[in-house]
Amino acid sequence: MQPCAEITWSGSREDGEALARRHDWRQLSGLEELWPELERLYGDAVALEAPHARPPEQLSFRLLRRRIEQAASAFAALGVRPGEVVALFAENGPRWLVADQGLMRAGAADAVRGSAAPPEELLYILEDSGAVGLVVESAALLEKLALPKACLARLCFVVLLEGTPQQAAAVEESGACGLVPCLAWETLLERGARGPLPPASEGGDNRLATLLYTSGTTGQPKGVPLSHANLLHQLRHLGVAVAPQPGDRVLSVLPIWHAYERTAEYFLLACGCRQTYTTLKQLRGDLERVRPHYMISVPRLWEALLSGFEDALAAMPASRQRLLKLALANSEAHALSRRTALDLTLDPVPPVRRLLARSEALLRWPLHRLAVGLFWPKVRQQLAGGRLRTAISGGGALAIHVDAFFEAIGIELLVGYGLTETSPVLTCRRPWNNRRGGAGQPLPGTALRIVDPENRTPVAIGERGLVLARGPQVMAGYYRKPEATAKVLDGQGWFDTGDLGRLLPDGSLVLTGRAKDTIVLSSGENIEPGPLEEALAASPLLEQVMLVGQDCKALGALLVPRPEPLQAFAAAAGLAVPGAGAGPMPGADPALLRALTRECNRLLAARPGSRPDERLGGVALVEPFSIDNGLLTQTLKQRRDRITARDAAAIASIYGQA
């Protein structure tokens, strides 16, 4: 009988050494206590900058602490009391962080969401959280919200992060705030500079720090209440994966209100890093200008950077293309053989195979070393500014081919895994144990258990099942939703992540899909779409993929093609290229769709451990999934239900049900 798949991670020797190099922050009983210590450590060094703000902003650690205390004084003067909640709807920038920490310093919590969320969702959060105040990005967003009278009756104030005092006064005169005072950011800080600092909060680290509302792929968002203890656990333990040095440059592109970006930001600032806020539009230029040492992002960004490399490669002369492709293939093979020799794959490696892999790595090393000297520094310079050697990817599974590319060119991708409900990090890959395709080992103090999805009994090490988690970073329960809490938290504190996975003997977690995304064919076979979609997205023909087929005889796929490679593919086969349009693309040649189906099935058949039922019965070409059209969440996860609704005609065409 194999041991059951459960582990409580106390940390490895390497973890201990990594933590010893970091501040452990054990003396903190609240996140707001961090900033005076950072002022003492780093003083006038730059903490935050927003070069694209109007006007541009830059704050040293000393000025950041002063601004936080001014905001805290002003919020207290406006009537915010310890334990109350204030809504904060805005995008990335120093003012967001100052407002966030000013509220915590005043003893309050914030309910956060981005300004791009639908107005009805923001109004729902405002009501559900019981917010007594509202900090909003701009007058334009406030106008879009059209605050109802019932909501205004509960608010003590509205603060505009952008805009002048005159604009705030105009909002008051317009009646958009009713009788509630509307303050510009400048006015708020001036008021705080004149007032006393509120007394330090009492109640220890179990105080509510923030309410994060899950964007979700289905249903109404739920409030996830995270305590100071939840957030401080992350601050104290993320150092097992990375060890930033004071002054290291960080580029921030993810939404700051999201748990992943937010926790990473607290941690990196605590290490004395200099953080620059950017946007997707400004990212390319800022990568070259900032030349970051660290960057936190989601798989979609790394996929986009790889796509940029492939586009640049396609524009090169044929001889140079062949040379770079040969060098890349060799470097990827060298990295794979090296990991195989070190037994850092997802399956056990027999000693003989490890020995052979070591020999292969030695044979491939001279050509790899040549590429390291000639090619990869230039590629890193063009893709990420040249200094990026460690990057953290989270918020979704990272495709193996993307992982392998960055490993080959010398950028270490450390994948983390977690959920909003877990603050968010549960596991992360360590530099000394970086198993490509895995989600890493747990953070210290974190327990994982793999159970049968049907009867919840533990399964053996290596067997797949439902991932449960328990630890100091796990929420106590959804905000004011006991029934929803009971569905995910049991009496022993085990949280149902909704993910499927397996544990390796060394404690590494390998994710295999989402329980609720499982496609059940009419034959009764269960298919996890995630790994198959990753394999298909590795094709240069395809930008995005979503599998379908619930209760059908075979799988189908909605494909978002890359236009130029698709044209070349069609031309090579003497086929017509489809035009643009919503749903199934008009003019899509049935012969082209059959050819694409064959190509997709070739890729699926090449997967290790491929099963006969993991084949496509047909495909359809559809328009892209994006945040703007509501088919991706803010963290770029597919909203499968909405895609299914939009592309119902395309799905019907796959199965001949039009």
Image (spheres, grey):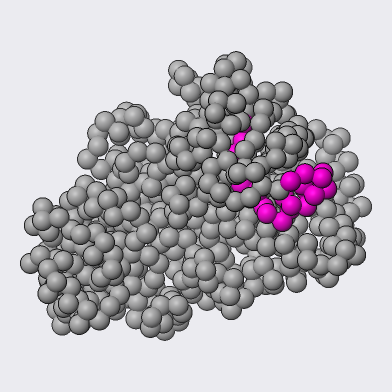
Residue 38 location, x and y as percent? 39, 73
Give 478 or 353, whichever is nearer the viewer.
478
Residue drawn at point x = 74 percent, y = 65 percent: 312
Q: Is residue 368 visible?
A: no
Using residue 192 as the reference point, say whether residue 428 is left or right of it. right
Residue 536 location, x and y as percent? 68, 41
Determine which quarter of the picture holds residue 345: top right
Q: Which residues are magenta?
A: 556-576
Residue drawn at point x = 56 percent, y = 74 percent: 286
Residue drawn at point x = 45 percent, y = 33 percent: 498
Q: Is residue 597 visible?
A: yes
Give 218 or 385, whichever is nearer the viewer.
218
Residue 162 location, x and y as percent? 30, 75
Above or below, 657 against 90 in this view is: above
Q: Is residue 574 magenta?
A: yes
Q: Residue furthest front?
A: 587
Above or below, 190 against 225 in this view is: below
Determine which quarter of the picture holds residue 600: top right
Residue drawn at point x = 30 percent, y = 61 percent: 89
Using residue 628 as the reference point, say whether residue 154 is left or right of it. left
Quadrant containing the N terminus in the rendered view? top right
Quadrant containing the C terminus in the rendered view? top right
Give 612 or 46, whichever is nearer the viewer.
612
Q: Is residue 570 magenta?
A: yes
Above or below, 317 against 513 in this view is: below
Residue 446 location, x and y as percent? 46, 42
Report the number of discs.
0
